[in-house]
Amino acid sequence: MRAKTDLTRPGSRSRAAVLFAVLGLAALGSAAAQGASNGPFAPKPPIAKALPDGSFELAFDVPRAYALRVAVWDPAGARIAVYGRADEDYGKVWVDLGHGLEGPFESVGNLVFSPDGRRAACSVQLGYEEYWVLEGGKRSGPWSDVTGTAFSPDSSRFLFVGYVRGTGATEVVVDFESRGRGREPGFFAGSRWFYRSYEGGWSVVTDSGVSGPWDYIPNVRVAPDGSDIMYPATDAEGRLWICTADRSYGPFPTYPPNGAEESGIRGIVMDLSSLPFLEPGFAPDGRTPRFFVREERGSAYAWTVYDGDAVAGGPWMEPGNLAARPLPSPDLKRAAFIVREGEKYYIEESAGRLGPFGDVRRLAYSADASTFAAQVRGAAWDEWIYGSGFKLGPYRNLDSWELVADGSLAVVWNGSRYDRSSTASFRTRDGELAPFDAALVPESTIFGAGPRSVPSGAGSLVRGEAKSFGPYEGLSRIYAGTPGGGALYATETADSWTLWADGKALLSTPDVPFNLEVPGTRDAVVPVMAEYRALAWLSFSGGFPRGLSAVDPETGKGRWIGVGRDE
């Protein structure tokens, strides 16, 4: 059992929201039999006054001799208020979720609001390995641990994962009803739920039934538009299937793993960080499954990109002595293969054959698909970026790089050159240094995904998906994107740190950096920490920050500021 972190005690270091993960299983307790305890007082709802700038002035009810450990609010009505004795740092706490004061408890965690901002939930600890879940005036427990509290996108349903005592297994609970043993649950299509299970074989369980058993299911992904789920599954015969909630595609012959000498394929170890098509995903419409698969074509094999039933790219015939999975170009009109002949490696790409090389570490196309390049090793194990006119190197080691969108330059983020020249740089095709231009930094590749901070004069420029902010003096730290294509970030000057959202300052501290851990779940409430103290609480909805609640724990007075929305 992992160590627990108490989010309600001011002297403790906070770990933000807990991911849906493999946990452990407990029996579901009767909510009616476990009604809320009478608290030492009956808190009044917080008073909220709208301000001209869209924020709200807040006043939480804080009785004498008590202090707020947590105070989070949403304009739609949800609230989480956790109270403790003002003279006790590690005493009991009471929780107000809008349904009366409940407690006393030892700690509170897994805080979450529903996406519509009307409901709130959390987990509480009553004793050693005794945890309960609170939501809507109901309780579920006891569990030996709790994680993954979440509301559905339409806010109509609530789920969590509970550890069952003494079993080492986890149970998925939806609307306070046990749905079976599993892990990594989630929602799609508004209120439909799913989870991955390993009970008598791998399976995916949804509100409409069970898919399986399968030999292996590596993951389950939700479509970007939230309409469906998709997962690759391998059957007992080693064949690959691509499945959604209600149908499947396949079967397809699987590509043998690297080093599968028994299959006649001599593999190499590849850097897969830049190869988005190696994992099944979704087409640009955000809902149709897209997958790059191997197919039998008579006595040979071919590789094809499908968008559901439709061919989106290929087929490309597989060459002999294949050494690694191939890579299609972003426009799905070209593909690059690595083959091995004896101790030499070659790259077979639509533009021609490259090589021989001592090894091939990575394949890459520019975003406009005009340029192909690869990270290769020479006979002396020096490294190069090579292809489509590029010949950059030699490097002693090359950790990360990418092509700009039009393929005219390569951005080397991290590496060591033999001539000890700057490695964080733009390079032309012949290896010459080019002026650094933030506008050319790739935004649609794996390394450049999401908001980023780039150098700008003596400071830094913050670039979101669609908006830029700054430049700012000193360093900046990026935490998350915002709904309008901006960013949530912090900046550092000589004497202060400031937390910003889309160019608007949220709060500042002198000399002390923020510690904000962005949740791995779409919805969560997490603390903004400084020196082990929660300065404020930030609510996330749909994967984006929604609002910041900064409230004085003694007086209950503070402010709510919307993030990334026109509140």
Image (cartoon, rainbow, N blue to C red):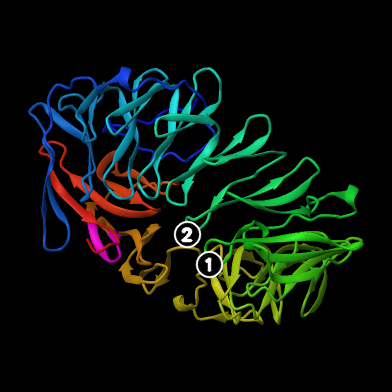
Q: Is residue 398 visible?
A: no
Pick the residue in front: 409 or 284. 284
Q: Is residue 341 left or right of residue 14?
A: right
Vertical position of residue 31 compared to residue 50: above or below: above
Q: Left or right of 433: which side holds 142?
A: left
Residue, disc 1: 285
Q: Which mark is residue 197?
A: none
Hey, what amino acid is under mark 2? Asp
Instruction: State the residue position of label 2.
Output: 225
Q: Magenta stretch: give its range.
A: 500-506
- Residue 130 at what x, y percent from top left? 39, 20
Rounded to the nearest angstrom, the CA distance separating label 2 from label 1 is 8 Å
**Few, some or many residues within 10 Å of mark 1 (<14, 14–19, 20+):** few
Dot 2 and dot 1 residues touching (CB under 8 Å) = yes
| Frontmost residue, 490 versus 531 | 490
User: Which quadrant of the view contains residue 434?
Assistant: bottom right
Quadrant showing the C terminus: bottom left
Q: Quadrant of residue 336?
A: bottom right
> Disc 1 marks which amino acid?
Asp
Principal SS element in the magenta part?
Answer: strand
Could you classify mark 2 by the number of other residues whose Cα lies within 10 Å: few (under 14), some (14-19), or many (20 or more)? few
Q: Magenta stretch containing residue 550, yes or no?
A: no
Where is residue 504? Give x, y as percent.
Answer: 24, 64
Residue 146 place in picture, x, y as percent = 43, 30
Helix, strand or loop at label 1? It is loop
Q: Earlier in the sequence, mark 2 or mark 1?
A: 2
| Towards the viewer: 420 or 392 | 392
Which residue does the image show at 11% across and 59% down from the upper left?
51
Q: Is 508 located above or below residue 53 in the figure? A: above
